[in-house]
Amino acid sequence: MKYFPIAAVVGLLLLAGMILALTAGKYPLSLSDISQLLLGNQPQDPRLSIVFWQIRMPRMLAALVIGAGLAAAGTAYQGMFRNPLVSPDILGVAAGAGMGASIAILLGLSMLFIQGLAFAGGLLVVTLVCVIARFTRRQDPVLSLVLIGIAIGTLCGAMISLIKVLADPYTELPSITFWLLGGLNTITASDLQIAAPLTLLGILPLWLLRWRMNLLSLPDEEASAMGVNVTRLRVIFIVSATLVTASAVAIAGIIGWVGLVVPHICRIITGANNQRLLPMSMAVGAILLLVTDTLARTVSTVELPLGIITAMIGAPFFLLLLMRRERL
């Protein structure tokens, strides 16, 4: 497929998704309203200004940043581990962040502490996985990281279940459950001021070194023979992708399938060259999250958790891809 015409179409779809996210909802905004608000003019109905600046705009920007970030992290993980079934939470990041947030909710802490403990939990788990992997020198290093991540993630899942058992069934348990299901309904501008720079800080090395991701698809011995420090490069990608994932989970909960499905879709469009695959994945990931978040708050009188929508779209689509392609 020709890349640039498709990239132009994806760019238009991204713009359409942004407009849809800003206009659709219980308080519909017209394009005229949006242009006037962007120019600093106050509408006759003051509620429109509140809806636009305090709800829709932070939520739209969060969908852009988180969708692009999770897709970039998924592309990096699948490339560096040479495994198309790897997703951003493979090293236990999402489970660790979920455990941290659940502990904060159980202790009755504020949203700031919930996000902080979620972020710390995700980074702590990945650090633990990397430390344990150093003691498994006799095993394949990539396979060891994945298996240890699965084991630690399962342990964190068990801890979350224990916390749910101990939580108050009328106050704390619903809060934990809805947070774990993911959503952008609590996103504020102050959340974005913290999470967006961290996410962009993680995306930057992935973007600048995306051509080197191609080298990690080679056997380690062959990549080393080309002058690449495979271990150092893999550590940079793991730290960057983990920072992106932990930042996203900290403010939006666990949103699955974006980092798994989007790279597969984009690989069909661009091929496996990460110089084109990574930007395309980021754009499509942002579109997917913009659309699913808009659906989550408009298809029902009650807002649906975002994790449910992404799973309902992502799982059938992934199975369709699996059946239509001989090899992922």
Image (tube, rainbow, N blue to C red):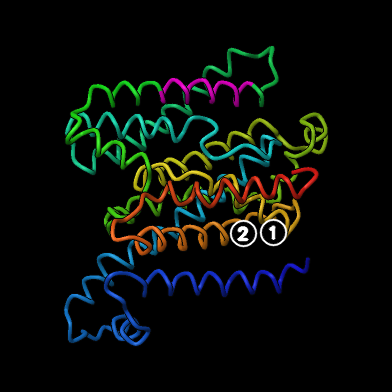
Q: Residues within 10 Å of mark 2 (few under 14, many from 20)?
A: some
Let me know if residue 300 is in the magenta part: no
**Residue at left 48%, top 50%?**
310
Contact (Cβ within 8 Å) of mark 2 with mark 1: yes
Magenta stretch in the rendered image: 144-157
From the image, give the main secondary structure of the stretch colored magenta: helix
Question: Which type of secondary structure does the marked residue at label 1 adopt?
Answer: helix
Please, what is the three-letter code of the amino acid marked with disc 1?
Arg
**Residue at left 30%, top 55%?**
185
Give percent across and percent down for residue 108. Answer: 17, 33
Q: Is 64 placed left or right of 10 in the picture? A: left
Q: How crowded is mark 1: few (under 14 residues within 10 Å), some or many (20 or more)?
A: some
For residue 147, above or below residue 105: above
Give percent across and percent down for residue 215. Answer: 75, 42
Question: Which type of secondary structure does the marked residue at label 2 adopt?
Answer: helix
Furthest residue toward front: 300
The circle drawn on residue 52 is none
Q: Name the residue under label 2.
A: 279
Nearer to us in this view, 191 or 15: 15
Question: Which quadrant would the N terminus be assigned to in this image?
Answer: bottom right
Give percent across and percent down for residue 48. Answer: 23, 77
Q: Is 42 placed left or right of 17 in the picture? A: left
Q: Mark 1 points at which residue?
A: 276
Please, what is the three-letter code of the amino acid marked with disc 2?
Pro
Question: Which quadrant would the C terminus be assigned to in this image?
Answer: top right
Nearer to us in this view, 24 or 47: 24
Q: Is 29 placed left or right of 106 in the picture? A: right
Give percent across and percent down for residue 318. Answer: 63, 47
**Residue at left 57%, top 60%?**
284
Nearer to us in this view, 267 or 210: 267
Real-space CA distance between mark 2 and mark 1, rounded to the nearest whole angstrom: 6 Å
